[in-house]
Structure formats: C-alpha cells, structure tokens
C-alpha cells in the first residue's frame, strides 16, 4: 500500500509555539503516513500537493485555483475553528471533505469574551491609566456614572458553542440574556435560559452586544452602520468572532460619533491592522491581537486533533468534524466507512 502523503505549507502557522509535527504525528503512529512541507507560493504548492492524499491547511489560502489541481486529495484539514482560509464550496464540488477543530478552544474564547465585557464595562484600562498618571481621585467619580452589572442585558449574535459558553458565564453575574441565530431552534435557546430575539431587537435592547457569527460568506459585513445606529448610547460591543463579520467603517463611525459607548475587540477586518486604523487611537476601545483562543493547551490540543482527523481519513473512515458533509454523497467517497470515532456525517 502506498504511503499516505500529507502536504502542508512550509513553516506557515498562526502560532509561534513549538515546531515540527510531533503532535500531529501521534495519532498517525502505526500508519504508513508522512507530513511533507511544500513551498508557500501557489505554483510551488500546487506542484507539491497535486498528488497528495491530504492537505494540512495553515498559513496560506487554499482557494479554488489550488483545489481544482488536487488529483488525489481525500481531506483538507485545518487546525482552527474558522474555515475561511479554504474555499469550502470548491472543495465540496471536488468531493473533498474539509475538517476543522470546532470544540477545542471554546472555553478560552468564552473566557476572553467575558474578560472584554467586564473590562469595558468597568473601564479597566481607563482606571489603570488614571492611577499611573496620578489622577487617583478621578477613578471613583468615573464609575459612579455606570450602573451595576446585575440586571443588564446581554445580546448574543449567533448562538453556537462559544456564545453558549458565554451565556453560562454571564448568568451568575445576573445578566439577562437573549440571542439571535436563524439556524438554531428557539427551544435550544430557551432550554439554555436564553430568550430568542431578532437581530434588530438584539442591537436596540441590549446593554452588551457580543458578536459570535462565523466567517462564512453569508456573514460577511453582517453588522453594518444601520445596526450600530440602533444601539443604546450606553451600550458596549464585543467581538471575539471574526473581524470581517462587521463592516469596520460603520463600526468606526459609530465609535467616533458616540452611537454606543465602548467596544472590546479581539478581531478586526484586517489583521494586523494598518498603523493608520482609527480604532488604534480610540480611548473607548479595548483591543487584543486575535488571541482569545490562546492558552497553554492551544497548540497541543489543535495539533493532535488535526492528526486524529488525518488518521481517520488515512484509514478510510469519516472524519469527526467535517464542515461540508454533503461530500459524503459523492460516489467517490462511498467506499469510505461512514463512521469516524463513532460519528457519521449526519451525527
């Protein structure tokens, strides 16, 4: 049997921790498989990946131009929640499953969202600056203008895994929670103690709006100027999802003109941002560098999960986290076992 060949862009990654492929290779132990690095330019990558059995996607976009040249690819695996770096539609048309790691960093991102919520609400950076600048007496008067957190309304845009984890964290603080997600049954929200609402209701009635929509084409610029105009002047906007889901020009205008009070942003439309992005100079914004998912277990968890997906496919089994399960209907894939780690494409 020929070696199962996995091609990945050389040295391309969104993390600096560790190196090599020891963690990805652990689940592949005992299988005749190898991970091979390829050039990161499109032509060089295509030349190396054309006959590969699998693509470990990281660091460079895997677009339709690459996908249509893959002659033997059985899976494209990502070590992230987001799949926006892969043209999933093109992969589906080519009959290639695309996998991600949707449940690996949920708790960390939810923690980060709550951190931004609390830090913006209690003006953490402002308070720190006052102390360092010798303005000690200004701290208390500034917070006397802010209501207590208990009883405030938190609106979640999208109600996926992270949003649900945020809701679990927010409840003990006494927040009243609602969510908008046209793809989630209202019963699921109600059972979680979250009230279903329209997007307009979320924007207009919430004291905090927390954005969790995924980076999919239908969610691009989902929140725009007209949505920010609906917000309370005292409201706070949090985004730990994806920058492109928000029309940044509209967000900047809203912050500059005071349509709402404050923002906590882990993601931006362009990352890293240009030095002349106005958001970088705003005192009513707290920023982090798309780090919400980072923790000590970050690399180990995601890399082993990628290895597990690749190992399943190498054995002719269905992967655990396929984002385009429609490919299972492709005749080329019917030779596969419909179960991977106890889960089939419709589970």
Image: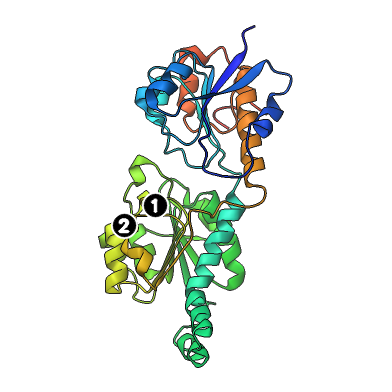
Residue 214: x and y, percent? Answer: 43, 46
Image quadrant where one finds the N terminus: top right
In this figure, which residue is indicated by the disc labeled 2? 248
Residue at x 31%, y 57% (from the top left corner): 248
Labels 1 & 2 near each other (Cβ < 8 A) = yes
Residue at x 59%, y 72% (from the top left corner): 173
Q: Report helix, strand or loop for mark 2.
A: helix
**Left-right relation of 285 to 226:** right
Residue at x 53%, y 14% (from the top left corner): 334
Q: Is residue 85 above or below residue 239?
A: above
- Between the residue at mark 1 and the residue at mark 2, the CA separation in whole angstroms equals 8 Å
In this figure, which residue is indicated by the disc labeled 1? 243
**Left-right relation of 23 to 323:** right
Q: Which color scheme is applied?
A: rainbow
Kindly tell me whether residue 317 is visible in this rendering.
Answer: no
| Label located before the other in sequence (1 or 2) | 1
Q: Report helix, strand or loop for mark 1.
A: helix
Q: Residue furthest top?
A: 1
Quarter location, residue 264: bottom left
Q: Is residue 167 above or below residue 102?
A: below
Kindly tell me whether residue 34 is visible in this rendering.
Answer: yes
Residue 55: x and y, percent? Answer: 51, 25
**52 or 194, nearer to the observer:** 52
**152 or 285, nearer to the observer:** 285
């Amino acid at each position: 049997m020929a070696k199962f060949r996995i091609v990945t862009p050389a040295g391309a990654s969104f993390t600096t921790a560790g190196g090599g492929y020891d963690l990805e290779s652990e689940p592949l132990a005992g299988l005749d498989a190898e991970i091979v690095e390829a050039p990161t330019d499109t032509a060089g990558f295509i030349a190396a990946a054309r006959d590969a059995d699998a693509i470990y996607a990281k660091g460079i976009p895997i677009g339709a131009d690459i996908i249509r040249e893959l002659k033997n690819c059985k899976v494209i695996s990502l070590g992230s929640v987001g799949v926006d770096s892969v043209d999933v539609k093109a992969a589906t048309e080519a009959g290639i499953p695309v996998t991600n790691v949707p449940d690996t960093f949920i708790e960390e991102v939810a923690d980060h969202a709550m951190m931004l919520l609390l830090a913006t609400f209690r003006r953490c950076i402002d308070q720190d600056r006052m102390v360092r600048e010798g303005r000690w007496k200004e701290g208390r008067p500034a917070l006397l203008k802010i209501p207590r957190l208990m009883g405030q309304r938190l609106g979640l845009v999208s109600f996926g895994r992270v949003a649900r984890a945020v809701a679990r964290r927010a409840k003990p603080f006494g927040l009243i929670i609602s969510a908008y997600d046209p793809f989630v049954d209202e019963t699921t929200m109600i059972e979680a103690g979250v009230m279903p609402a329209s997007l307009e209701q979320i924007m207009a009635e919430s004291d905090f709006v927390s954005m969790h929509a995924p980076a999919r084409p239908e969610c691009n610029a989902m929140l725009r100027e007209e949505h920010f105009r609906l917000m309370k002047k005292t409201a706070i906007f949090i985004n730990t999802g994806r920058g492109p889901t928000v029309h940044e020009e509209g967000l900047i205008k809203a912050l500059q003109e005071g349509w709402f009070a404050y923002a906590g942003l882990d993601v931006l439309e362009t990352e890293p941002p240009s030095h002349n992005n106005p958001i970088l100079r705003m005192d009513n914004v707290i920023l982090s560098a798309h780090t919400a998912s980072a923790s000590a277990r970050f690399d180990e968890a995601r890399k082993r999960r990628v290895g597990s997906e690749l190992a399943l496919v190498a054995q002719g089994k269905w992967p655990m986290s396929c984002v385009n399960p429609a490919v299972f209907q492709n005749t080329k894939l019917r030779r596969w076992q419909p179960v991977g780690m106890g889960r089939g494409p419709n589970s």
